[in-house]
Structures are given as C-alpha cells and as structure tokens.
Image (cartoon, rainbow, N blue to C red):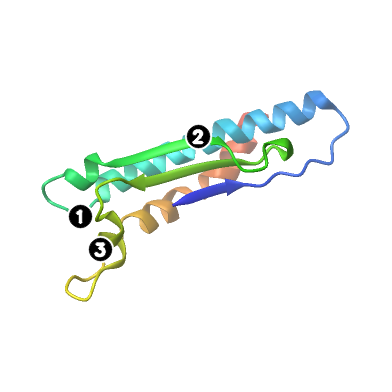
Amino acid sequence: MKISCDIKLNLKSKEVQDAVKKAIQKSLKDVVVDIANDTIKGSPWKWGTNARSIMFEVGPGGEVAKGDLEGAIYSTSGYGGYLETGTVKRPATPYFKPALDRNIKKLPEGIKAELR
C-alpha cells in the first residue's frame, strides 16, 4: 500500500515552504508507522510469519523537485496480498485496509499540529 502526499505550495517565503514540508514529512512518517503497527496487529495468519514480514518506508516520491512525499507499507511474506484479498479457496481477511482507514485521518491533523 502506498500513501502519497502531493503538495503544491503557493507561498512566497522559502522559510514557510520549508516549515510546511517538514510538517508534512513528520506527520506522514507518524501516520505510516501507526498504519504499519495496526497492520501487524491485524495480520490474520496465526504463526506470525506474515506479521513479522510487514515493513514500511517513508521518503521522497517520484517528483522530489515538487516536494512530493510517499510512504509504503508492505508484506514480504509472499502471501500477504492473498490474506488481504482472498483467493478461490480462502476468504479475504482484510488487515491493510482497516489499518489505513483507522489512521489516515491523522495525517491532516498531524500536519496542523506540527504547524502550530
């Protein structure tokens, strides 16, 4: 799962632009960590291999010049996607999407808090 913040600032002051970008970076990192932790807690596989394989990254996106930022949460188990979406033989057990839904609203709140 990827989370992308596409920011376009119409601010004249470089100082203010930097403050806004820094607030977005901090809030995005906090939200991605929260989503990753909830994803690990919600991982349905009982032996824990999938939960231990959940990783996350936060960094600049594809258009660094524009200040875009991205966060990614993913499973390296090889079957994390099948657990999330299900298969013909196994019903879906969503754990990424519920974690995203619970935490994504924290992103704008976190940005505002960082700018105060």
x, y percent for residue 96: 36, 54
Is 70 left, or right, of 89 in this rendering? right
Question: Circle 3 sits on which residue?
Answer: 93
Which residue ends up furthest to the top in the rendered image? Answer: 15
- Decide which of tag 2 and tag 3 comes sooner along the chain: 2
Quarter of the image for the C terminus: give it. top right
Secondary structure state at the residue bearing disc 2: helix
- Decide which of tag 3 and tag 1 comes sooner along the chain: 1
Disc 2 from disc 1: Cα separation: 25 Å
Q: Residue at x 62, y 30 (%)?
A: 114
Secondary structure state at the residue bearing disc 1: loop
Quadrant in the rendering for residue 21: top right
Question: Circle 1 sits on which residue?
Answer: 44
**Residue 88 marker:** none
- Decide which of tag 2 and tag 1 comes sooner along the chain: 2
x, y percent for residue 34: 40, 40
**Residue 29 marker:** 2
Q: Residue at x 88, y 32 (%)?
A: 12
Tag 2 near tag 1, CB within 8 Å = no
x, y percent for residue 89: 17, 74
Q: Nearer the viewer, residue 2 or 115?
A: 2
Amino acid type at mark 1:
Pro
* Image vertical order of residue 27 relative to residue 84, above or below: above
Secondary structure state at the residue bearing disc 3: loop
Amino acid type at mark 2:
Lys
Tag 3 near tag 1, CB within 8 Å = yes
Q: Residue at x 22, y 76 (%)?
A: 88
x, y percent for residue 53: 26, 41
Disc 2 from disc 3: Cα separation: 26 Å
